[in-house]
């Protein structure tokens, strides 16, 4: 997460930080597409405490790392691999994802749908809440040589996926803005 802004468009304290999430796609009570998070792991302790207390968002403190490795032929990070590691506090959920980013791709309708969620839902204090999210479209790149080892889904009480993961790489979006959370009903 980089340059995260509050609803008033003020910079969030420590506005750049790593985050890993396990999510699914849902339709809210008014038929609006959104995200439901099973877990949100981050190194940002203030966000973890505030989002849990105020929104019921399932943020968990974690150690997260992203590293670029050099290509074997010495061409630098562009030809190398990305390695992501995470360990939730207490070691209750871990993952390691390694991939080689490929060229930019023109996203399919499915890829646009998977990366274009404009709200997140949470349940807190007996109510369903909706938080608007604004960001530009994710610039997607293909990936090769993908290796994933994780127990994040099992930690959420879910079965291990039967199919191989669908993995894309993105150089990221520059501006993410979170709107005012309100009851969704």
Image: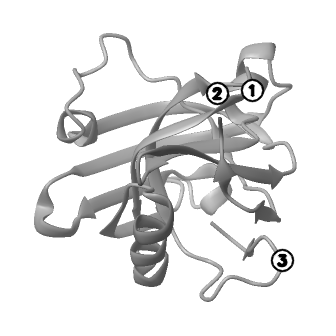
- In the depicted structure, whether residue 4 falls above or below residue 31: below
| Residue hosting label 1 | 32
Coloration of the structure image: one colour
Residue where numbered disc 2 is placed: 28
Q: Position of residue 87 (x, y in %)?
A: 24, 61
Point out residue 26 in the picture as x, y percentages from the top left corner: 58, 24
SS of the residue under disc 3? loop
Q: Are marks 2 and 1 in contact (CB under 8 Å)?
A: yes
- Cα gap from disc 2 to disc 1, whole angstroms: 5 Å
Q: Is residue 55 left or right of residue 102?
A: left
Q: Which residue is mark 3?
A: 8
Mark 1: which secondary structure?
A: loop
Disc 1 or 3, which lies upstream in sequence?
3
In this view, the residue in front, 123 or 168, is 123
Residue 30 shows in this picture: yes
Q: Are marks 1 and 3 in contact (CB under 8 Å)?
A: no
Residue 4 versus residue 19 in the image, above or below: below
In front here: 137 or 182? 182
Task: Tell me how far mark 1 sits from mark 3, CA to CA.
Answer: 23 Å
- At x 65%, y 35%, the residue is 185
Can residue 69 be seen at all in this image of the molecule? no
Residue at image x 62%, y 88%?
13
**Closest to the observer, 162 or 104:** 162
List x then y, in percent, for residue 82: 50, 53
Q: Residue furthest top?
A: 162
């Amino acid at each position: 997460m980089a340059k995260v802004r509050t609803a008033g468009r003020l910079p969030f304290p420590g506005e750049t930080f790593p985050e890993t999430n396990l999510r699914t796609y849902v339709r809210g009570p008014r038929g609006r597409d959104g995200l439901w998070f099973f877990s949100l792991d981050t190194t940002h302790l203030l966000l973890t405490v505030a989002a849990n207390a105020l929104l019921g968002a399932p943020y968990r403190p974690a150690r997260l790392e992203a590293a670029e490795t050099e290509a074997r032929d010495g061409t630098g990070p562009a030809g190398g691999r990305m390695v992501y590691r995470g360990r939730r506090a207490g070691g209750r959920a871990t993952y390691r994802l390694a991939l080689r980013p490929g060229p930019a791709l023109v996203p399919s309708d499915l890829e646009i749908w998977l990366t274009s969620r404009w709200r997140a839902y949470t349940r807190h204090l007996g109510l369903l809440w909706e938080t608007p999210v604004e960001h530009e479209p994710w610039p997607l790149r293909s990936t090769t040589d993908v290796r994933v080892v994780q127990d994040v889904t099992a930690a959420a009480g879910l079965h291990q996926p039967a199919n191989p993961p669908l993995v894309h790489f993105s150089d990221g979006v520059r501006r993410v803005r979170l709107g005012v959370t309100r009851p969704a009903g």
